Image (spheres, rainbow, N blue to C red):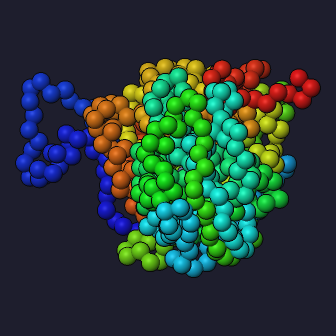
């Protein structure tokens, strides 16, 4: 473990610190004094937590779960066994009941697909302008999504299908009049609203679910395509090419086909913009012009004068992991449930790294698990108890593609139409006290009003997510509840810091993203100021408490990306 203390300092203090500690910081008569930072929090020792949500308890649990002993909490390792056993013990100690049909644990089956000899894999295109070979890593990345041991694609016709979107409510169909059975579909990243910034089209710059790669692969498979290639560009994807390569190379986890009966692509991949430009030019088309045409209403898909062949082999391993459940039973409506969730899994350890080799995942997602247990403890001691049941789920396999929550919604503890809401916590920033709470996916459901009220009770305000184009709503476990029709809340500290304002908040958050996110440096820091994150957790507890004592079900807004399915017979 790297022993560098990483204090998150407001910009002004960071500058002072950089100037050297011998000289006292210069003061001007007009500078407002920032509130003094509290003394370092002493984490509560295990078994000595209070029913209230406190910085000491939160810190104690966060320190424990992000400790080196848990080895980065990778599913399938000893770190998994330690983590799930510890969470179950915590649930039991604070007085929860087993939450999944009288069990603490739900086994999640999974398969791992490993591409063999990846660096020899090529995408070979025959075009009227000659052959184009795309190389692994530099031009493209590819995987099988159908759990097959061998992929053999021979002369599959290539079609450019714009954004690959079928959205009846937007009166938009990129596959209109097109039969893509057995063909290879090339699509753009993001959605048409990103392309032309028309606010009336797919929410403009904000990413809709239609812009996520998961959706594009699902839709291409539903249309009968054999392969789908997404053309990468950094602003539209929200991350650079090396992130695509890192997350798509190595073993890929998925639910077994029996758990996921929807059609799956034989070959799914990404290609760089440069590779697309070369390929389209050889096929007699101009990629940049076609790209521009794709965000205009009336776009028609274009068959390229190109055929794709590719051959590769996979190793398929069957394995499993665990979701952990605890519950407080409702006093008057126990069949209805409010869900709190957070993923326990992280990236494990990497012996090839020099120095610190453990991905402790303190922020991602030790904070979510610490928050989950703190909220559970408050509900467990609540008198009178909540009227509806409250379920606490620690999900596995979030980092592998939201698989634990995906399995849960098809094997739920309570029917989804009795599930009032999911309040999910993932990577809560620890920035010190903030004047606002950021709601990711603001404008989707009535839960916005509930969190606004909870924030107001703390003299804080609400802001919409800073970067809606990054689609954070679709990038953690709440997505699977939303897709099942259950309204979701994903909220965390905004960036307007009480000590230092927006600029300091932005800087601290950017520092986390650049230097600690998904790196071994995401580890517990005894110097952290927990005041803001504890308020965030208390606000989420207040929202759930209100929902648990209501008789109504919160509604999605009319233009939300999701809706509750019609009730049977209704
Ligand atoms: Zn996470």
Provide residue 558's location: percent of width, then percent of height.
66, 20
Residue at 70% from the left image edge and 39% from the top image edge: 177
Image quadrant holding the N terminus, namely bottom left
In the picture, which quadrant includes the C terminus? top right
Tell me how many marks there are: 0
Image coordinates of residue 453 in percent, x first then y, are 55, 20
User: Which residue is at 56% across, 74% downward?
Assistant: 121
Hey, which quadrant is residue 274 in on the image?
Answer: bottom left
Up the image or down, 155 lies above or below 299; here it is below
Query: Most extreme residue toward the right, as rendered?
Result: 569
Residue at the farthest front position = 128
- Residue 312 appears left or right of 258: left
Residue in front for this viewpoint, 138 or 438: 138
Residue 74 position in % (x across, y down) = 59, 65
Q: Please report the residue visible at 74 percent of the width from the left and 69 percent of the height from the top.
A: 148
Foreground pick, 42 / 464? 464
Q: Nearer the viewer, residue 254 or 93?
A: 254
Q: Is residue 468 visible?
A: no
> In the image shown, does 358 or 205 lie closer to the viewer?
205
Write down the quadrant of residue 79 in the picture. Answer: bottom right
Residue at the spot x=9%, y=44% of the render?
24
């Amino acid at each position: 473990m790297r022993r560098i203390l990483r204090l998150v300092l407001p910009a002004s203090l960071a500058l002072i610190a950089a100037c050297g500690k011998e000289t006292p910081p210069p003061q001007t008569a007009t500078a407002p004094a920032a509130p003094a930072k509290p003394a370092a929090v002493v984490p509560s020792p295990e078994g000595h937590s209070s029913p209230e949500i406190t910085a000491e308890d939160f810190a104690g649990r966060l320190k424990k779960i992000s400790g080196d002993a848990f080895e980065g909490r990778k599913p399938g390792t000893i770190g998994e066994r330690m983590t799930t056993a510890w969470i179950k013990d915590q649930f039991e100690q604070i007085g929860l009941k087993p939450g999944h049909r009288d069990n603490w644990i739900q086994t999640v089956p999974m398969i791992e697909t490993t591409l063999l000899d990846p660096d020899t894999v090529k995408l070979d295109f025959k075009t009227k302008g000659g052959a184009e070979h795309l190389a692994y890593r530099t031009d493209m990345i590819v995987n099988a999504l159908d759990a097959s041991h061998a992929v053999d694609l021979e002369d599959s016709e290539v079609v450019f299908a714009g954004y690959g979107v079928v959205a009846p409510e937007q009166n938009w169909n990129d596959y209109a009049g097109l039969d893509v059975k057995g063909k290879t579909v090339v699509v753009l990243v993001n959605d048409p609203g990103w392309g032309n910034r028309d606010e009336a089209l797919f929410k403009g710059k904000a990413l809709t679910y239609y812009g996520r790669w998961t959706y594009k692969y699902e839709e291409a498979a539903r249309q009968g395509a054999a392969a789908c290639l997404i053309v990468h560009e950094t602003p539209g994807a929200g991350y650079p090419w090396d992130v695509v390569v890192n997350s798509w190379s190595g073993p890929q986890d998925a639910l077994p086909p029996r758990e996921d009966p929807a059609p799956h692509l034989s070959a799914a991949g990404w290609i760089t913009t440069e590779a697309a430009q070369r390929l389209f030019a050889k096929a007699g088309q101009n990629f940049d012009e076609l790209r521009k045409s794709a965000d205009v209403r009336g776009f028609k898909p274009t068959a390229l004068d190109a055929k794709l062949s590719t051959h590769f082999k996979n190793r398929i391993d069957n394995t499993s992991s665990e979701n952990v459940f605890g519950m407080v039973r409702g006093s008057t409506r126990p069949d209805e449930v409010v869900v709190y969730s957070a993923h326990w899994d992280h990236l494990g350890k990497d012996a090839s790294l020099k120095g610190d080799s453990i991905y402790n995942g303190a922020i991602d997602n030790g904070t979510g698990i610490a928050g989950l247990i703190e909220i559970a403890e408050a509900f467990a001691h609540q008198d009178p108890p909540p009227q509806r049941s409250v379920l606490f789920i620690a999900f596995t396999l979030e980092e592998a593609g939201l698989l634990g929550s995906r399995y849960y919604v098809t094997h739920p503890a309570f029917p989804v139409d009795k599930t009032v809401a999911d309040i999910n916590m993932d990577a809560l920033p620890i920035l010190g006290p903030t004047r606002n709470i950021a709601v990711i996916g603001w404008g989707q459901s009535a839960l916005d009003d509930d969190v606004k009220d909870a924030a107001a009770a703390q003299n804080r305000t609400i802001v919409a997510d800073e970067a809606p184009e990054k689609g954070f709503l679709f990038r953690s476990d709440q997505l699977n509840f939303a897709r099942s029709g259950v309204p979701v809340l994903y909220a965390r500290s905004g960036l307007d810091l009480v000590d230092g304002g927006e600029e300091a908040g932005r800087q601290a958050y950017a520092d986390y993203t650049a230097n600690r996110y998904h790196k071994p440096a995401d580890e517990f820091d005894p110097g952290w100021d927990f005041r803001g994150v504890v308020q965030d957790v208390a606000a989420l507890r207040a929202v759930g408490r209100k929902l648990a004592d209501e008789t109504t079900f919160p509604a999605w807004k009319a233009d939300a990306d999701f809706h509750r399915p019609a009730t049977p017979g209704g």
